[in-house]
Amino acid sequence: MTLDVHELNAFYASPLGEASRRLIGRVLRARWESCDGLSLMGLGFCGPYLDRFRDEATRTLALMPAAQGVSLWPPGERNAAALVVDDMLPLPDACLDRVLVAHALESAEHPSAVLEEVWRVLAPEGRAIIVAPSRRGVWARVDGTPFGHGQPFSRGQLRDLVRDAAFSSVFWGEALYAPPFRRRVFITWGPAIERIGATLGLPFAGVHIVEAIKQVHRPVGARRLAQKRLIRLEPALAPTASRRPA
């Protein structure tokens, strides 16, 4: 089931949504320390995470899938959001430096086609970060958050999707180790639980965070170059002239 944009806005306006935005956002900022002079796009529902990069990037877009709906972003400013078909983006090839995918793959009909389209619009050596719910996490089992809707992924499933889309993964991380309880005590202690979970590598985080790079390899031609065959020379003694009696 796909959440609509109103439910997503309501979640991120709540204390639990704000806490999850901060916890996931810390990992994103650690990976992308600066986006100065870069073009950036969010696919899915990425507004809460794009805010921290918007003032740095040269251009920032928020593209939202048709099944989800679209809302104005950023609020109160010139709109930079659009409603799109997630596997047919209205962008030219190799036009972006960074792409963030959040609240997109789990509700996509064809996740592999979505990542292939992300690969198409990224420039060579461009980077994408994918935030997707973890199959083992508690958040995927709770309907009260957006991460409990749609298809969660195991690490192996996500690795196959990234590889099949011709990306090379450069970072694997997780976030949302704290349980998705709305009580103030859990929200307050969320950052401490997050640090402990990341340090110990606990297996029940709520989301996977994968950074991948678009590497364009030079195609190998079908023509084979002729190779010179060297004859191996064996050392031998030079023949000596025999003396005949006069």
Image (cartoon, rainbow, N blue to C red):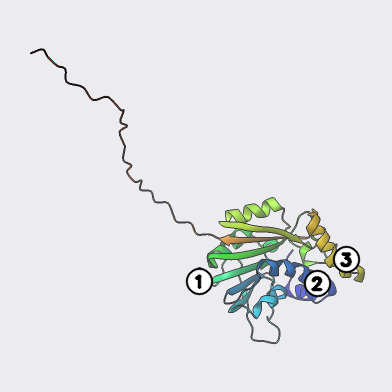
Instruction: Point out which mark residue 181 bears.
Output: 3
Residue type, numbered disc 2: Gly
- Secondary structure type for disc 1: loop
The local crowd at label 2, few if under 14, some if 14 to 19, many if 20 or more residues have their Cα within 10 Å, is many
User: Residue at the spot x=70%, y=76% of the render?
Assistant: 52
Q: Which residue is mark 1?
A: 92
Marks 2/3 in contact by CB < 8 Å: the verdict is no
- Secondary structure type for disc 3: loop
Marks 1/3 in contact by CB < 8 Å: the verdict is no
Residue type, numbered disc 3: Phe
Look at the image and tell me in which quarter the N terminus lies.
bottom right
Closest to the observer, 27 or 39:
27
- Secondary structure type for disc 2: helix
Q: In this image, 167 relative to 12: left or right? A: left
Reading the chain from its start, which is encountered first: label 2 or label 3? 2
Furthest toward the front, the residue is 246
Residue 204 in view (yes/no): no
Q: Which residue is mark 2?
A: 17
In whole angstroms, how far apart are the C-alphas of marks 1 and 3? 42 Å
Residue type, numbered disc 1: Pro
